[in-house]
Amino acid sequence: MIIVADASPLVALAICDCLDVLEQLFNEVKVSQTVYEEVTIGNKPGSDKLAAYLQGKIVGLNLDNYIIGGDSLDKGELTSIALYKHLQADYLLIDEKAGRKVAKLNHVKIIGSLGVLIEAKRKGIIPSLKPHVEILRLSKAHFSDDLLDYALAAVGE
């Protein structure tokens, strides 16, 4: 099973030290060169972890071969959707609302970073969701308290 990841959920999973969960839920994790650069250049949270984690997972892709739509999307989101199509991946890991909307319009099966954590809890990969949610709550990751509370309620925590 292949999952293509966009930048924001990778950063969120790095912040709460759960990048390894991806490979436990999916056989292969892939990112576009653009997403790799977004998450590793500069002083972004988790950039060192992500640079190491993403080695061997980067795929170059020419966007000129794809029509995706979505003028409001950044290049990382566009290349992630195109890479999903190119690889015929099983899931796209994406958190941003606009990106999720365009992905759905392109018949892309999506999951977000909280969805990954919920699945990891349900499958016993992580013993509890709450510590990870609390790390995200205190971080600069953009999750509403309602969404974080919903994730906890989804797994009975």
Image: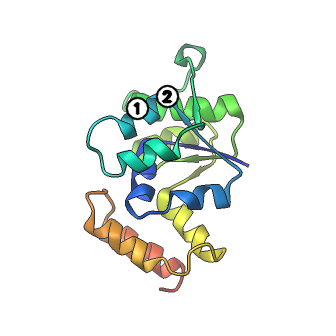
Callout 1 environment at 10 Å: few (<14), some (14 to 19), or many (20+)?
Answer: some
Way the structure is coloured: rainbow
For the residues labelled 1 and 2, say whether their Cβ atoms are less than 8 Å apart.
yes
Whole-percent x, y for residue 38 in the image:
37, 35
Going by the numbered disc 1, the residue's amino acid type is Glu
Q: CA distance from mark 1 to mark 2?
A: 6 Å
Q: What residue would you read off at disc 1?
A: 37
Q: Is residue 4 left or right of residue 27?
A: left
Going by the numbered disc 2, the residue's amino acid type is Gln
Q: Residue at x 51, y 47 (%)?
A: 53
| 50 to 112, vertically: above or below | above
Q: Residue at x 50, y 38 (%)?
A: 102
Q: Is residue 87 visible?
A: yes
Q: Residue at x 64, y 55 (%)?
A: 23
> Residue 26 or 114: which is nearer the viewer?
26
All told, the count of numbered labels is: 2
Q: Residue at x 64, y 77 (%)?
A: 124
Residue lying at the far top in this picture: please name it. 64
Q: Is residue 4 left or right of residue 45?
A: right
> Residue 46 or 101: which is nearer the viewer?
46
Q: For mark 1, give the secondary structure.
A: helix
Whole-percent x, y for residue 145 in the image:
31, 71
Q: Is residue 95 visible?
A: no
Whole-percent x, y for residue 129 in the image:
48, 76
Residue lying at the far bottom in this picture: please name it. 156
Q: Is residue 5 left or right of residue 108?
A: left
Q: What residue would you read off at disc 2?
A: 33
Q: For mark 2, give the secondary structure.
A: helix
Whole-percent x, y for residue 61 in the image:
57, 22
| 134 to 52, vertically: above or below | below
> Which of the numbered marks, if any, corresponds to residue 20?
none
> Residue 25 or 92: which is nearer the viewer?
25
